[in-house]
Image (cartoon, helix red, strand yellow):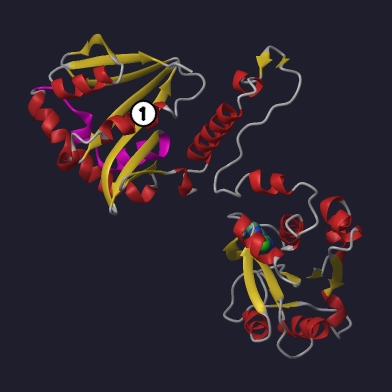
């Protein structure tokens, strides 16, 4: 694979000579060529930027040096197997999937933008001759695309066949299956009073695989709820972490579900019936919240948060027409599974008059701990690990 980098800071790419990419270079798997864009300028000051049409702050990279650079690298006709990558914070996010696509190309030409960006006609012009992608590293702004070109090259090069000694470590790592990696441990088995999780020393490979998968799902649900594969398909119901876009439907479902509670517990003030939409948006951003969807419709939810050693579970709701099918029980099990290490007890609150709820919770192993305020009872169950 050939990797070209077009930049006004060629020294910035020195790390490509080292580390992973350097190794690939030695093996002859990749050929990295860094080019100073200014060699395609013709004025005394080697100018690469100018003021923006339409006004505004900052400078824009002029098209002429870029056009000449691409002509010099790629010729003036169409080319096959070449992807030109414009690194820009307004590009599409770089992901492992994009890295895999790029690893299959014969040649990648990075065009590292600086200042406010490159004249858009450069992108349009080169797109008539080669595959073009505008790629961003993430939602933050760097001074230029050089670091992005480095990062993308490192992610791509390690996927080029022949680069990694151990192909399995490519398959098992973070993001390859849409989940974050499980935590890893090595010797000694006890260090500063901390033990390696016993299952890893058990020699039981099935138990180890199950533990690792569970840890990966937990981490993904906690840290990256946007990575939807943390979801679990339960016949035709999908359970996944809440997203901000669920707020409206969740607000409506919650009102509908707690009307019945108010009937069963007259005189009790039920926050779920009185809170504002903004209140709900605040707690879905703060707490651990799961939602259930069936055929695109929001049909259930549950939330939890840690209070000392207590994993406080609440707002367990199921659409009235789907009650009695075990969805509430499943949501309860799923939120219990997300309890952090520090939790020693699951706790939930329900109306003293909510006989059906209490029956469901007792079946799930909860015991009544008494009335915490008039009309409200607390039920708990020990966390077993
Ligand atoms: Cl590719 N370029 C710049 N300048 N800033 C960025 C970026 C790229 N990706 C994230 N921030």
Task: Give yes or no for residue 126 being in the magenta stretch.
Answer: no
Task: Give yes or no for residue 280 being in the magenta stretch.
Answer: yes
Rendered residue at 76%/90% (across/down): 76
The answer to which quarter of the image holds residue 113 is bottom right
Instruction: Pick whichever, 359 or 122, lies toward us.
Output: 359
Task: Please provide percent x and percent y for residue 103.
Answer: 71, 63
Q: Secondary structure at mark 1?
A: helix
| Quarter of the N terminus within the rendering | bottom right
Furthest residue in direction right, as rendered: 26
Residue 207's place in the image compared with 102, above or below, is above
Rendered residue at 21%/45% (across/down): 252
> What is the chief secondary structure element of the magenta stretch?
helix
Q: Which residue is mark 1?
A: 333
Task: Please provide percent x and percent y for residue 357.
Answer: 19, 24
- Residue 173 in sight from this viewpoint: no
Rendered residue at 16%/25% (across/down): 269
In screen coordinates, is 160 left or right of 40?
Answer: left
Find ligand 1 in the image and state its quadrant. Answer: bottom right
Task: Please provide percent x and percent y for residue 226.
Answer: 47, 48
Furthest residue in direction top, as rendered: 370
Instruction: Pick whichever, 342 or 374, lies toward us.
Output: 342
**Which residues lie in the magenta part?**
267-286
In screen coordinates, is 10 left or right of 313?
Answer: right
The answer to which quarter of the image holds residue 126 is bottom right
């Amino acid at each position: 694979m050939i990797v070209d980098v077009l930049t006004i800071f060629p020294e910035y790419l020195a790390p490509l000579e080292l580390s992973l990419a350097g190794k690939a270079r030695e093996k002859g798997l990749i050929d990295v060529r860094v080019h100073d864009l200014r060699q395609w300028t013709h004025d005394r000051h080697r100018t690469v930027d100018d003021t923006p049409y339409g006004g505004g702050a900052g400078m824009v990279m002029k098209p002429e040096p870029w056009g000449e650079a691409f002509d010099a690298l790629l010729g003036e006709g169409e080319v096959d197997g070449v992807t030109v990558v414009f690194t820009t914070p307004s590009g599409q996010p770089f992901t492992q999937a994009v890295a895999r696509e790029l690893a299959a190309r014969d040649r990648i030409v990075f065009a590292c933008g600086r200042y406010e960006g490159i004249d858009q006609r450069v992108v349009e012009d080169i797109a008539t001759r080669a595959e073009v992608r505008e790629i961003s590293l993430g939602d933050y702004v760097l001074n230029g695309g050089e670091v992005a070109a480095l990062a993308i090259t490192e992610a791509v090069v390690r996927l080029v066949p022949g680069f990694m000694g151990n192909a399995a470590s490519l398959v098992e790592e973070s993001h390859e299956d849409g989940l974050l990696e499980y935590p890893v441990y090595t010797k000694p088995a006890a260090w500063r009073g901390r033990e390696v999780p016993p299952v890893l020393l058990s020699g039981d490979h099935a138990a180890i695989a199950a533990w690792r998968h569970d840890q990966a799902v937990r981490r993904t649900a906690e840290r990256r709820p946007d990575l939807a594969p943390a979801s679990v398909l339960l016949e035709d119901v999908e359970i996944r972490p809440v997203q901000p876009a669920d707020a409206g439907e969740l607000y409506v479902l919650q009102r509908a579900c707690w009307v019945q509670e108010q009937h069963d517990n007259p005189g009790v003030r039920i926050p779920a019936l009185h809170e504002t939409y903004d209140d709900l948006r605040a707690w879905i951003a703060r707490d651990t919240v799961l939602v259930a969807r069936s055929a695109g419709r929001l049909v259930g939810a549950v939330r939890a948060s840690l209070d000392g050693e207590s994993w406080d579970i609440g707002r367990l709701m199921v659409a009235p027409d789907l009650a009695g099918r075990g969805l509430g029980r499943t949501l309860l099990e799923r939120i219990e599974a997300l309890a952090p290490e520090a939790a020693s007890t699951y706790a939930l609150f329900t109306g003293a008059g909510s006989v059906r709820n209490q029956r469901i919770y007792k079946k799930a192993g909860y015991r009544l701990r008494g009335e915490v305020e008039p009309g409200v009872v607390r039920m708990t169950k020990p966390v077993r690990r």
